[in-house]
Amino acid sequence: MNNASLIKKRYAAERRFRAFGFGAIVVTAAFLAFLLFDLVSKAIPAIIVNEAMLSIQVDPELVDKANPVAGDYLGMTKKALAQHFPDMSSRADRKALNGLLSAGAADVLQSRVLADPSLIGQSITVPVALNSNADLFLRGMDDGQLSDKQKELLGAMTEKGLIIKGFAWNFLLNGDSREPELAGIKGALIGSVFTILVTLSLALPLGVAAALYLEEFAVKNWITDAIEININNLAAVPSIIFGLLGLAVFLNVFGIPRSTPLVGGLVLSLLVLPTIIIASRAAIKSVPPSIKEAALGVGASHVQAVFHHVLPLAVPGILTGTILGVARALGETAPLLMIGMIAFIVDVPHGLTDAATVLPVQVYLWSDLPEAAFQSRTAAAIILLLIVLFAFNALAIYLRKRFERRW
Amino acid sequence: MTRLLFAVSALAIAASPAFARDQIRIVGSSTVYPFTTAVAEAFGKSSGMKTPVVESTGTGGGLKLFCEGAGEDTPDIANASRPIKKSEFETCQKNGVTDIVELKVGFDGLTVATSVADSDISLTKQQLFLALAKQVPDKDGKLIDNPNKMWSDIDASLPATKIEVLGPPPTSGTRDSFAELVMEAGALKFESIAALKKSDPKAFEAVWKTMRTDGAYVEAGENDNLIVQKLEANPDALGIFGFSFLEENAGKIKPVKIEGQVPTFETIASGDYKVARPLFIYVKKQHVGQVPGIAEFVAEYTSAKAIGEEGYLADKGLIPLPADAAKESADTAKNLTALTADKVM
């Protein structure tokens, strides 16, 4: 074989390798694009909803000025809707008509009146939530739950211009609900925040302290070797095991209340601790020894050298490891099953010991419900979870760039 | 901090008879979960008390937690898609949960369904057994590995399509109920198996409980929505799931007749459609008065507004009880009559 053909072969091999690499990227990007497209298209019904714009007479007979909370706002809403259909007077007709409204149809009206009691006796125009079946029908997705009569009514309402599209504030501002149009993510989001706060405030100081001690101060002998091996093993233990541990220790021995962000955070901090220790040790190890030796050389104590020089330089690596660990904790559901966080919780938690659930659990729970409208809520919750994870990773990159020092 | 909490909560229990907890805790079946959560929400809205927390742990897991003892850190109510077992009842008694109130709240129909694009078919329990059991009797009544590949292999009147049924995995309560209500009943139609039941109950149980693993029965996971989606994609396949999923997806899938009966609200409630199971909630009577709202919650659950024929749970797919059974449940809820050992199977 001559030189020219050998060179040709080498170039061909290089081109092949580049093509394979490029192909791999294209395939991955296509999968990701497909996933995102699927999610976003499914999530739209949860984000933009059809509502009825109704002019409602705030009847002083149905709401007492002294006690506006107890007013029959749903009654007023139903009356206002019935006024548009004067010939629908039989009980069955009324039922069909009212069946189009959500159980939370009067929520906006109620909050407006509570905010401004002088509205009592006046007429105001407010958006009224529709039942999720009606909403789906208006999008051309018939889930078979509406009668023909109701479909006609919806057609008539659209013609009269009563139907508008609005942003689904319910999804962002409500806790969980069994009515898809009222179900919101706020409870799970706040629950996730509380849980992660507990996780971080425990795992970060413990993890960094353990890493510093093991890397800088511990005597190298078989005990520290054994500890190191165990930490590496712990990082690979299935997460459900941590849930079982949490059940046995935190719930049964310490008696911490079930389903709370406190116990969830404790369990998740055990889960991310090995990740943080390993990342922190790697970061500490990568600080050039000459820096510490210089500090020791000018008379700093070992602790001073470590805390004044080594640790600040290791911060970017420690933060990256921590944030990646926390991102993992944010996506966990399995360990939370054992400690009762896979639960239907309507009230938005106000503290660490209120019952709460977290974002991925909310996704899991909604995906399992029979109502078709919950599938869009599931997709929207997944998108929100992805946004939170994206934000965490962006923060990791920013912090690394911000604190990074080259020498 | 944890030690402190422990100490504080221990003190709180010792100091006052009522629990510090003011929120009802419910655990148990994922089948009852969609109904109990709806009641919990309605109760929270109408009573002004905290909305109960409902965990989805499965019937067995829920009753285990429920029977762990009476006290603040144990649940007040357990959802169950089957009656409490004798062993569970005894565990409860042993752990000091002496007064349990059993409330039947309705029925759940198990349906076999197919895509709306498929032709209508009607199956018997015996045919379903022949399609899905790992071992079936041959002409002489000897058990052989299931040879049926096509529905027409079972009965010439059935379509000549491949047997493919999507259903829940063994961990699911739906699977247990399907095995009991369909597979066991279907198996008993064969004389040889009926004889086996008498001679060797264990072997008999293995026959109807073991589903085939050669691809005709596909374990599609606990999530019934997934099965619905797979049926849409594959019109020839059948799927097994709860009635509420059939109802909510009426535009995509349709039921298969079993023993000549279509599962509808009416046929399940009247008992004509036989593949249905009762759903229960179990209430820890010792917690009534300790945790506020239990009696009111149970009253709400058994009211006509919730489980009646026009109730809001009917909209969620719960099949209402016959009138006398509904009244019995309401009475039991009012008097909180405790379950006695002789009533437990």
Image (spheres, grey):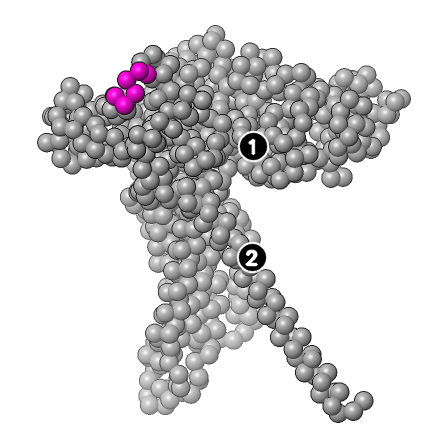
Q: Residue at x 43, y 51 (%)?
A: A383
Q: Is residue A305 left or right of residue B34?
A: left
- Kindly report the secondary structure that dominates the magenta region of the rendered protein: loop
Question: Percent position (x, y) of residue B261?
Answer: 63, 16
Chain under numbered label 2: A
**Residue position for label 1:** B252
Which picture quadrant has residue B233? top right
Chain under numbered label 1: B
**Is the residue marked by circle 2 packed among few (<14), some (14-19), or many (20+) residues within 10 Å?**
few
Q: Is residue B337 above or below residue A142?
A: above
Question: Percent position (x, y) of residue B315?
Answer: 44, 23
Question: Percent position (x, y) of residue B324?
Answer: 48, 7
Depth check, front residue: A246 or A150: A150
Question: Percent position (x, y) of residue B115?
Answer: 62, 32
Q: Is residue B145 above or below residue A199?
A: above
In the structure shown, which secondary structural element does the residue marked by tag 2 occupy? helix
**Residue position for label 2:** A31
Depth check, front residue: B20 or A405: A405
Q: Inspect the magenta stretch and tell me whether residue B92 lies in it.
A: no
Which stretch did the figure color magenta? A83-88
Q: Is residue A127 left or right of residue A118?
A: right
Which picture quadrant has residue A184? top left
Q: Is residue A18 above or below residue B174?
A: below
Q: Look at label 2 and name its amino acid.
A: Phe
Q: Residue at x 40, y 30 (%)?
A: A134
Query: Which of label 1 and label 2 is nearer to you?
Result: 1
In the structure shown, which secondary structural element does the residue marked by tag 1 occupy? loop
Q: CA distance from mark 1 to mark 2?
A: 27 Å
Q: Look at label 1 and name its amino acid.
A: Lys
